[in-house]
DNA sequence: GTCTATATTGTGATAGAC
DNA sequence: GTCTATCACAATATAGAC
């Protein structure tokens, strides 16, 4: 989507991604990013002018990676039940690769809704299509009567929440054992789909 | 649980609660809190010594208000299905009164897991009891076979997630109409319970 | 392009007058 | 108890040498 980045530019972006995702905008300093990249602060400004611009580069990338592509499943030719199994599995697997992204996006969206909503709109995202598909399935009788918004929110909630609440779940329920928590996530790829399909059985 | 607070002390705590809940620890400055309270920074330090101590006072209060009391429902004498209806309704209603608390807690827990977990443990919280109750119901056959952890996480997810993701849901799905979003939440008090009870029907 | 040095403003925290 | 004034340091950002 863009011209080739210089070596330093990618070095900076990688460092910025690590630090911003972990600490959020307010918890991040240009110094930390410079240290992470092994260069000095001035270079950050040379390439990205300001902390805000560097942040936006990282945010758009994180958002694009996580939110829109996942919805593609719903436009395929599987039957609806398969779409849901596929959606849950794909989504949880994707989040496992970047587990900090959910909380990062939720927090930044809260911190600066106006600007971030603007950024997201520029990615061309639109949830209405998925809603229409759900409505059609209800009409067809494939699934039970349910508010499509509730179904969508419930699906997202059960996929995303464990990542956002990881310290609490892992710390309190799983005695702080990271491996057990990962197994819990793996199992959920089918468990959550079962849960949803039971709930919306006609 | 504590001695009576002076008038100024509650004034400060109220202001600190507003600012911390809205902006998080990193996004909050002592100056903002002082302005919100209509006093000067020095007084904050006089009463609470440091930003950290003031924050901890606010965090413990927020956590105590939101997390442990809700679990009480499960120790009552209703039948299990009624407990779930009651839990969902009570929880969503409580969150509507302090809608920023979920994201606040999740974010701070991520920012400083060690210290925060320590704080939480001092409240005497323990999820094992609720898990045992769920296990008993499965054994009795009142509900279907399900991993108790999944059931607990799913319930919490569907109650909490809409608050954490409010800017996204309200902004994208509900055309930024706060009233429609509130109605959506009200409806969920029964919809989510129905969803869960369908999913775990034996 | 990359660095050091510096300008400027904001931060948490304290001293000391009243 | 409450204020003003101030400290020591960290923040974003820029100027200018190389």
Image: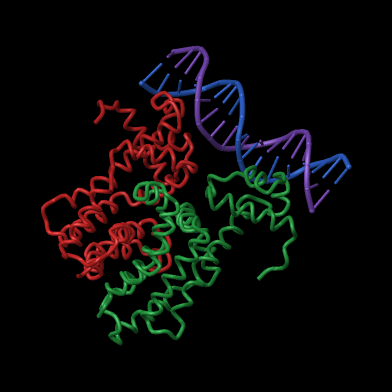
Chain colours: A green, B red, C purple, D blue
x and y percent of residue C14 in the render?
51, 19
x and y percent of residue B83 in the render?
17, 57
x and y percent of residue A120 in the render?
52, 65
- Give the quadrant of residue B192: bottom left
Total residue callouts: 0
From the viewer's side, name the closer residue of A36 and A49.
Answer: A36
Left or right of B61? Residue A24 is right
Q: Quadrant of the C terminus of chain B?
A: bottom left
From the viewer's side, name the closer residue of B19 and A148.
Answer: A148
- Residue lying at 43% horizontally and 70% vertically, measured from the top left: A89
Depicted B53 relative to depicted A183: above or below: above
Left or right of A153? Residue A49 is right
Depicted A189 relative to depicted B112: above or below: below
From the viewer's side, name the closer residue of A187 and B85.
Answer: A187
x and y percent of residue D10 in the render?
60, 35
Depicted A185 relative to depicted B103: above or below: below
From the viewer's side, name the closer residue of C10 and A61.
Answer: A61
- Residue lying at 18% horizontally and 51% vertically, measured from the top left: B73
- Give the quadrant of residue A135: bottom left
Q: Quadrant of the N terminus of chain B?
A: top left
Single out the residue that lies furthest toward the left.
B77
- Residue lying at 47% horizontally and 40% vertically, measured from the top left: B28
């Amino acid at each position: 989507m863009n011209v080739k980045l210089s070596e330093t530019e990618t070095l900076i972006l990688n460092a910025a991604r690590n630090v911003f995702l972990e600490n959020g905008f307010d918890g991040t300093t240009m110094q930390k990013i410079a240290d992470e990249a092994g260069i000095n602060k001035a270079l950050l400004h040379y390439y990205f002018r300001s902390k805000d611009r560097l942040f936006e580069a990282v945010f758009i990338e994180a958002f694009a990676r996580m939110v829109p592509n996942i919805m593609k499943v719903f436009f395929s030719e599987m039957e609806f039940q398969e779409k849901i199994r596929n959606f849950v599995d794909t989504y949880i697997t994707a989040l496992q690769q970047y587990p900090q992204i959910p909380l990062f996006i939720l927090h930044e969206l809260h911190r600066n809704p106006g600007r971030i909503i603007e950024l997201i709109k520029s990615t061309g995202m639109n949830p209405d299509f998925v809603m229409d598909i759900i409505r059609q399935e209800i009409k067809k009788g494939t699934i039970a009567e349910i508010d499509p918004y509730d179904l969508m929110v419930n699906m997202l909630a059960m996929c995303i929440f464990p990542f956002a609440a990881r310290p609490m779940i892992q710390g309190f329920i799983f005695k702080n054992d990271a491996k057990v928590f990962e197994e819990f996530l793996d199992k959920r790829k089918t468990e959550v789909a079962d849960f949803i399909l039971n709930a919306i059985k006609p």
